[in-house]
Image (tube, helix red, strand yellow):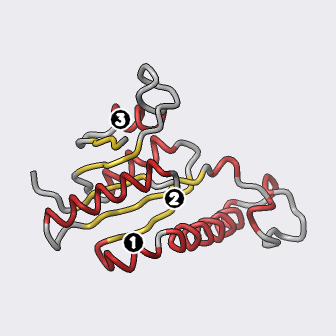
Amino acid sequence: MKLETILVPYDGSEQAKRALEYAKDLAAIAGGACCVRAVHVMPSDLINEKDLDGSSLEGVPLGLLGREEYQGLLNKVVDRARERVKEGLQDVIDEMGDSLVVDVIADPSAVDALVYYAKKHDADLIVMGRRGLGGLRGMLGSVSYGVLHGADIPVLTVR
């Protein structure tokens, strides 16, 4: 199996950090052409005024904003989240350089967002942590379980 792109769902948890380490090792074995994409999914349906750090339009409720205004605010929230994720991964970014791409996407469904992202970026493998909070007899979390069944590519879960 040729590995060019490895997707790692990243939420900052210990399980996600272990999955990222595993993906980093796989990328090193695969050679310099392999890219690891650490992707954080924000639940877009839970974004509220406090996430905007005073960027809302004079106290106008988000539900009353037009599509373009809301999209602009959402982009600001995603950009801020990307910077926070990058700060938390700075050691890995320094080590991997351009071989690591950090992305943040806003979507109400982490599973759907990750499966779509994997297709869009032609990922060869998804490496993800598992929490064991539910799903398959307590062994896989609901996101791991959903991605495992929704993805058209191999999914490796790391304990």
Query: Along the horizontal axis of the image, is 6 left or right of 147?
Result: left
The span from disc 3 to disc 2 (Cα, nearest Å) is 18 Å
Contact check, label 3 and label 2, Cβ < 8 Å: no
Looking at the image, tell me whether mark 2 or mark 1 is earlier in sequence order.
1
Q: Quick check: marks 1 and 3 in contact, CB under 8 Å?
A: no
Give the image quarter of residue 79: bottom right
Total numbered labels placed on residues in the image: 3
Q: CA distance from mark 1 to mark 3?
A: 28 Å
Other residues around mark 1 within 10 Å, as few (<14) / some (14–19) / many (≥20) = some
Image: 75 above or below 112: below
Left or right, 109 with respect to 102, comes to right
Callout 3 amino acid: Gly
Residue that numbered label 2 is attached to:
105
* Residue closest to the far right: 59
**Residue 20, image x and y in percent?**
36, 58
Identify the image quadrant of the C terminus: top left
Horizontally, residue 146 falls left or right of residue 121, namely right
Q: Which of the labelled discs sits on residue 92, or is there none?
A: 1
> Residue 149: horizontal and vertical position, in percent?
34, 31
The residue located at (81%, 68%) in the rendering is: 56
Local secondary structure at mark 3: helix
Q: Position of residue 43 (x, y in %)?
A: 61, 49
SS at mark 1 in the image: helix
Disc with the residue nearer the chain's start (1 vs 3): 1
Quadrant position of residue 137: top left
Residue at (19, 62) in percent of width and height: 4
Q: Please state which amino acid type lies under the numbered disc 2.
A: Ile
Badge 3: how crowded within 10 Å, few (<14), some, or many (20+)? some
Tell me which amino acid carries mark 1: Val
Distance between the Cα atoms at labels 2 and 1? 20 Å
**Mark on residue 150?**
3
- Image location (x, y in percent) of residue 13: 52, 51
